[in-house]
Image (cartoon, grey):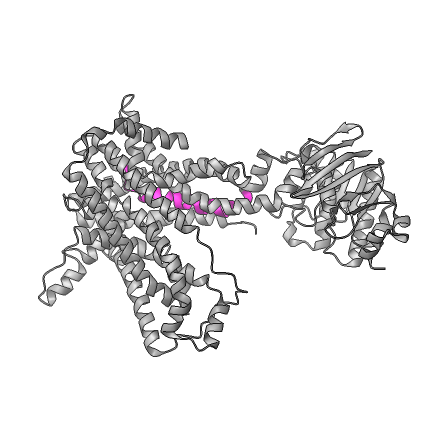
Amino acid sequence: MLKLEAATIRNGTFTLSADLIVPTGATVAVIGPSGAGKSTLIEGIAGFLPTAQGRIAWQDTDITDQPPGARPVAMLFQEDNLFPHLTLAQNVGLGLSPNLRLSPDDKARVRAALNRVGLTGMDTRKPGELSGGQRSRAALARVMLQDKPLLLLDEPFAALGPALRMEMLDLVAQIASETGATLLMISHAPEDARRITKQAILVADGTAHAPRPTGELLDNPPPVLRDYLGS
Amino acid sequence: MAALIFGALLAVALRAETGRGFNAADWAALRFTLVQATLSALFSVLLAIPVARALARRRFRGRSLLIALLGAPFILPVIVAVLGLIEVFGRGGWVSAALGTLGLPPVQIYGLHGVVLAHVFFNLPLATRLVLQGWQEIPAERFRLATLLGIDGWSMFRVIELPMLLRLIPGAFTVIFAICLTSFAVALTLGGGPRATTIELAIYQAFRFDFDLGRAALLSAVQLGLTVFAGGIALWLARGEGFGSGLDRGLRRFDGKTTTARCIDALFIGVAAVFLLVPLMAIALSGLPGFADMPGQVWTAAVTSLGVAALSTVLLLCMALPMAAAIATERGRMVEIAGLLGLAASPLVIGTGLFIAIRPYANPQAFALPVTALVNAITVLPFALRILVPRARDIVARQGRLGLSLGMAGLPFLRHVLLPRLRPQIGFAAGLAAALSMGDLGVITLFADPNVATLPLQVYRLMGSYQMEAAAAASFLLLILSFGVFWLLDRGGHRHAET
């Protein structure tokens, strides 16, 4: 499980405190008003922002001081999830080896991952030649190969149309359940959260609250969330 | 890098004979250096203002080509330009010939005015680009508003353009002043004698003719003080604020539509273009006939120069790439300062230091070519960093986190992301390094024995022995090679480059 013990994550002058536990294999939405600190939480867990106090642990291993690449974390950002000058096969291959030394066996796994996300035969294409949806698929193929126990999404599909976004979310849910990964996903749309997460962390007023069942939180929102959702 | 420069400076400092002080010739050199740099900067900037104004408000065919050509003198070998200027303005040149048909005496190019002429030739384009940039930073909205208010001509100049110029001119003047302070090859070829010797040239003479290392070191120290002072002022002036941003809707000017304004603009653009292009044409015209029967040592020198240029380019990249990476990932405040040191120490000063440092252990002449390549690389380093660093910063900002999250920190990121994405900039920097090294006539003159020559030095020697036809042919070859290596490397960076 992922444990944040009295952790304070600093983002410039802003700080977010979190004291919570996410069970292994959970699917969790991170919801809350704009500027409340959703990205701060995710980037703190990924290691891009420093933990000023407290600690972060995964399966009882303290990861507070580990650099991002060493953490048990795969992450998708809002944009720039692929290197534009590398082919899809190379981009996905980075999930297996950060210095791109790939054995024939690795290359077969890269091809299989591309097949799995519906990009068969696109190995030699570059991101610039693909549509937004195809780029998302390629990034997900890399996430599959990274095979990290924690998958963090910082709204990577925000720029896609509604139908395509649902398709990607379903793919994420499938991949997470296949690999047994624990999913944390920032969400602005309640329907996204309901669709693939069972639990939700509310981030508001500089605090990340412990996860609660998604449906319950959205059906019965506290005032700060109700103002944000506008219902 | 810093160790190298400071080591050279230390060697200079230890050798400098401060006790003896300046003799009359040294004072004359100091005075001449300051006078010629002031005049060169003054004329370059004064001429650049109307030329840049004309270029800013006119649209005509070949305008962008002309602006691109304004960048060419940067990689143009000094000796080639000097020879071209002699062909046009020299005693037996075109201007003198034209005057002769009118029964007037020929003009003389050697001396202060020749040195200033050559410096204006090199720095007018730079000044024009600097001033033009100031014009282009004025948001189009300002001009639109001014037009709406009925402001035109002289009032347009006073209200909008003059404030921009007043802010920009001191910086442009100081930059060119600083460049002209360290002028060596121009003073070597067009100056000389007690009345037209720069400090840089005096260092060379102390070295080469008197073999007075103490005096060379003392002059080097003075030179260093001058360049650091002028460079510091230039940097300080350069940090001025911008003109406020507009929404930048493609600059369309509504003023200056009168016939007089058009004629004045056309005149300035025409005169500048002729002044810059005719000496190069002269080299091509007089160089071509002698091309086939050039002396054998010219070809040997050309091969030597290509080798020096290649070595210098490799050395530059070995210094610039790690430095750019360190600066971009914000580990490199000190590294950035070290890169600027190359600007402060003039090539001959570093050369003098290296000569003094090598001499106790080996014959410095044996190191003529590697030292030339190294000093060339150090000279280009500040420019290379200015080309590489902004783009490297951009790449790290956009893709650094993705790399980190994939565990690519360090070498894998450098190899698979930073270097491939920097390729166009690396090509451009390498092109500059190769071309500048190819055409450099500086340190090599300190170190070379009579049996070794780079192509620029060979041209200089041919000029010295009055073989002007062979010199013209050799400098035409030098011109082709300099622009050729630049073009090849720059293009190599752009081929298959990704967006």
Would residue B291 be visible to someone looking at this image?
A: no
Q: Which percent across, then down, holds residue B115?
A: 22, 51
> Which secondary structure dominates the residues rendered in magenta?
helix
User: Disc count in the image?
Assistant: 0
Quadrant of the snapshot with the N terminus of chain B: top left
Say above or below: A56 vs A115. above
For the point 49% across and 50% down, the residue is B494
Would residue B417 be visible to someone looking at this image?
A: yes
Q: Which percent across, then down, holds residue A4?
A: 78, 35
Segment tinted magenta in the rendering: B420-444
Q: Which percent across, then down, holds residue B378?
A: 38, 38
Say above or below: A12 vs A106. below
Magenta stretch holds residue A144: no
Magenta stretch holds residue B442: yes
Q: Quadrant of residue B206?
A: top left
Residue nearest the observer in this picture, A123 or B90: B90
Say above or below: B381 vs B142. above
Residue nearest the observer in this picture, B108 or B240: B240
B389 to the left or right of B268 = right
For the point 54% across and 49% down, the residue is B497
